[in-house]
Image: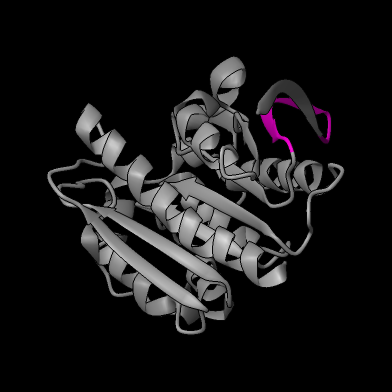
């Protein structure tokens, strides 16, 4: 049985809407981070799937999205990383959530920020779908104003972990990783996924999957269902295995 509860997170002087799914009983925590121009409802089905395994799942809307979309032009990566930290702290603070058993599921921009989160908070499991990549400079500049042509060129490069904050985080991450690529992704090309894949040198395990015929947004129902199935299968493998070992 899963209870669903709407919440409001406080991030400085801002408010962020979220939804927490509380299975009974529960122990592990899973935080879901949507991509740029997305919202928390995109992860509703997947959060319910993982909550059915006994995980406490939290979805939320990044600042500049959903109810705060009017402020998207001024939202920075710093703002959105602060949102994720606040969401993590809320999840970790819930009764019976094991602080040593928290995972993050992120897509695109959300995947990029989720990777950085691993250097700020304890993360055991990390699932990244089409994680984006950005230059470290202009961190405090509104994300919407970044040079798109420069960004596209950057994403075609081979970038060493030492030259990018997100990749550097991946290089020292020692938990279990799921990395998912879309075959026909024109926004986050395979070269970006390759940079992430080679950076996870110290991961406990790395599961890599390519969604055939899928685009970046998973525009068709088949791609959506396939990703949900991949995510749930991976969660069963790593979360339930860890749970059984602890019992």
Residue 242, x across and y down, in percent = 61, 67
Q: For the stretch drawn in magenta, what is the main secondary structure?
A: strand
- Which residue is rendered at x = 45% and y = 28% of the image? 42
Residue positioned 46% across, 75% down in the render: 205
Above or below, 19 relative to 123: above
Query: Does the magenta segment cover residue 240?
Result: no
Residue 89 as seen in the image, left or right of residue 220: right
Percent x, y of residue 165: 54, 68
Please report the residue visible at 28 percent of the width from the left and 55 percent of the height from the top.
181
Q: Quadrant of the C terminus?
A: bottom right
Q: Is residue 159 visible?
A: yes
**Quadrant into which the N terminus falls:** top right
Who is closer to the viewer here, 180 or 54? 54
Question: Magenta span covers which residues?
Answer: 11-24
Q: Quadrant of residue 192?
A: bottom left
Q: Position of residue 212 (x, y in %)?
A: 15, 49
Q: Name the one closer to the observer, 128 or 176.
A: 176
Q: Is residue 70 visible?
A: no
- Looking at the image, is 184 positioned above or below residue 7? below
Residue 145: percent from left, percent from top: 45, 38
């Amino acid at each position: 049985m899963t209870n669903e509860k709407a919440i409001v997170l406080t991030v400085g002087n801002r408010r962020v809407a979220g939804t927490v799914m509380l299975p009974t009983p529960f122990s592990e925590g899973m935080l879901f981070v949507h991509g740029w121009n997305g919202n928390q409802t995109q992860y509703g089905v997947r959060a319910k799937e993982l909550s059915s395994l006994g995980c406490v799942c939290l979805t939320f809307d990044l600042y500049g999205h959903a109810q705060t979309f009017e402020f998207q032009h001024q939202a920075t990566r710093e703002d959105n990383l602060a949102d994720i930290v606040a969401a993590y702290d809320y999840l970790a603070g819930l009764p019976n959530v094991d602080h040593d058993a928290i995972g993050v599921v992120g897509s695109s921009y959300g995947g990029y920020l989720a990777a950085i989160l691993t250097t700020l908070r304890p993360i055991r499991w990390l699932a990244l779908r089409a994680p984006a990549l950005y230059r470290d400079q202009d961190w405090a500049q509104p994300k919407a104003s970044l040079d798109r042509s420069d960004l596209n060129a950057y994403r075609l490069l081979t970038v060493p972990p030492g030259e990018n904050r997100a990749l550097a985080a991946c290089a020292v991450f020692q938990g279990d990783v799921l990395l998912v690529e879309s075959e026909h992704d024109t926004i986050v090309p395979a070269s970006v996924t390759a940079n992430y894949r080679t950076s996870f040198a110290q991961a406990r395990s790395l599961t890599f999957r390519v969604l055939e015929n899928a685009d970046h947004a998973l525009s068709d129902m088949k791609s959506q269902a396939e990703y949900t199935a991949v995510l749930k299968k991976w969660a069963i493998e790593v979360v339930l295995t860890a749970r059984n070992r602890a019992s």
